[in-house]
């Protein structure tokens, strides 16, 4: 290749996406980017190296296996590596993990990610829920000031189940009963005015006072102002918990009463519904993972594949919540 052609070729790399650059790098023998995920995993493990069996930090090197350094625990004699006891233990194709984390941040479907990484769709699906196991738990500890709460209902789905408890529905289908029923799963979302958000899958059917008591007291301040719609369960909960409460009468067309409104939480509901459409139906048993995934994207605290991989191993970015 002539020097002029080489310069033109190199200049085109700036227009490539991250996934395309990673795919190009894997074509080069001995490319350093192939070991980027392994190096990142090892660096996270070195900071808090301990035996998963007895939790002792007294260990020594014990050879290599599958590209990772192995260790032997001195007190109990067990061997382990940087992934033992983490959600990514026993998974293969480590060199593709950063590229897959990039797919998650881009909200790629299972089949899209499988095509981009040239892996089987079952592998892409397994990786999705392994990557989200710990990342979904990175939530604010408490809501402050004015907190809005509202519920969202999704049609219950047994997608992927081998044994259905009801006749199968085509492409999601529709509920057989009108209104809120046991065919729908309730998602409670609470959000304060700083954007900190918590969500809970409370179960099938309408939201109840008992479910609110199980979810909200540990995560809201006693002096918080809880703003909701006119649902009777919120009033009963706030009265029993001794929490200040304001209800907005949405049925009467009143959406804002001074500082009291539920616009923020309703906007979050709208973004969540629109995002879930990408996946053409989500199995109800995996809803907590998808809610955690949506929080990762909406909060913007995890912006790079490297940060997401670290979060999957338990090293979260610093949570700036007072």
Image (cartoon, rainbow, N blue to C red):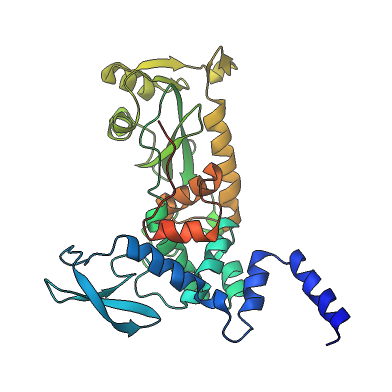
265 relative to 67 in the view: left or right: right
User: Looking at the picture, does residue 84 appear above or below residue 187?
Assistant: below
Residue visible at 33% across and 60% down in the picture: 47
- Which residue in the rendered view is the most extreme toward the front? 3
249 relative to 91 in the view: left or right: right
User: Looking at the picture, does residue 124 appear above or below residue 218?
Assistant: below
Residue visible at 44% across and 15% down in the picture: 246
| Quarter assignment of residue 111 | bottom right
Instruction: Looking at the picture, tell me which residue is in the foreground, 25 or 151.
Output: 25
| Quarter assignment of residue 233 | top left
- Which residue in the rendered view is the most extreme toward the left? 75
List x then y, in percent, for residue 9. Answer: 81, 76
93 relative to 215 in the view: left or right: right
List x then y, in percent, for residue 8. Answer: 84, 74
List x then y, in percent, for residue 92. Answer: 43, 78
List x then y, in percent, for residue 165. Answer: 36, 58
Instruction: Looking at the picture, tell me which residue is in the foreground, 77 or 233.
Output: 77
Residue visible at 54% across and 15% down in the picture: 259
Residue visible at 79% across and 70% down in the picture: 12
Instruction: Looking at the picture, tell me which residue is in the foreground, 169 or 202.
Output: 202
80 relative to 56 in the view: left or right: right
Can residue 107 be seen by looking at this rendering?
A: yes
Please identify the quadrant where the C terminus is shown: top left
Instruction: Looking at the picture, tell me which residue is in the foreground, 219 or 19.
Output: 19
Can residue 166 be seen by looking at this rendering?
A: no
């Amino acid at each position: 290749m002539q020097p002029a052609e080489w310069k033109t070729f190199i200049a085109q790399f700036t227009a490539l996406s991250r996934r395309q650059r990673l795919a190009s790098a894997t074509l080069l023998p001995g490319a350093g980017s192939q070991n980027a995920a392994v190096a990142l995993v090892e660096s996270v493990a070195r900071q808090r190296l301990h035996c998963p069996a007895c939790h002792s930090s007294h260990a020594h090197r014990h050879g290599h296996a599958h590209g990772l350094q192995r260790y032997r625990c001195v007190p109990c004699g067990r061997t382990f590596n940087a992934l033992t006891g983490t959600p990514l233990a026993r998974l293969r194709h480590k060199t593709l993990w950063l590229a897959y984390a990039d797919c998650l941040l881009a909200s790629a479907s299972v089949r899209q990610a499988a095509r981009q990484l040239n892996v089987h769709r079952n592998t892409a699906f397994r990786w999705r829920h392994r990557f989200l196991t710990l990342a979904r738990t990175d939530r604010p500890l408490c809501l402050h000031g004015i907190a809005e709460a509202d519920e969202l209902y999704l049609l219950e789905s047994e997608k992927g189940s081998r044994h259905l408890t009801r006749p199968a529905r085509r492409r999601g289908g529709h509920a057989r009963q009108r209104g809120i029923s046991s065919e729908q799963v309730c998602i409670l979302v609470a959000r304060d005015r700083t954007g900190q958000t918590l969500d809970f899958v409370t179960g099938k059917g309408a939201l109840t006072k008992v479910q609110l008591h199980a979810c909200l007291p540990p995560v809201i301040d006693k002096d918080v102002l809880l703003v909701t719609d006119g649902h009777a369960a919120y009033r009963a909960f706030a009265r029993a918990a001794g929490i200040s409460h304001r209800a907005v009468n949405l049925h009467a067309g009143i959406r804002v009463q001074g500082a009291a409104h539920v616009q923020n939480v309703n906007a979050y509901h709208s973004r969540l519904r629109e995002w879930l459409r990408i996946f053409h139906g989500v199995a109800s048993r995996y809803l907590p993972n998808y809610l955690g995934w949506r929080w990762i994207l909406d909060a913007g605290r995890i912006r790079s594949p490297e940060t997401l991989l670290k979060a999957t191993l338990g090293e979260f970015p610093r949570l700036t919540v007072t």
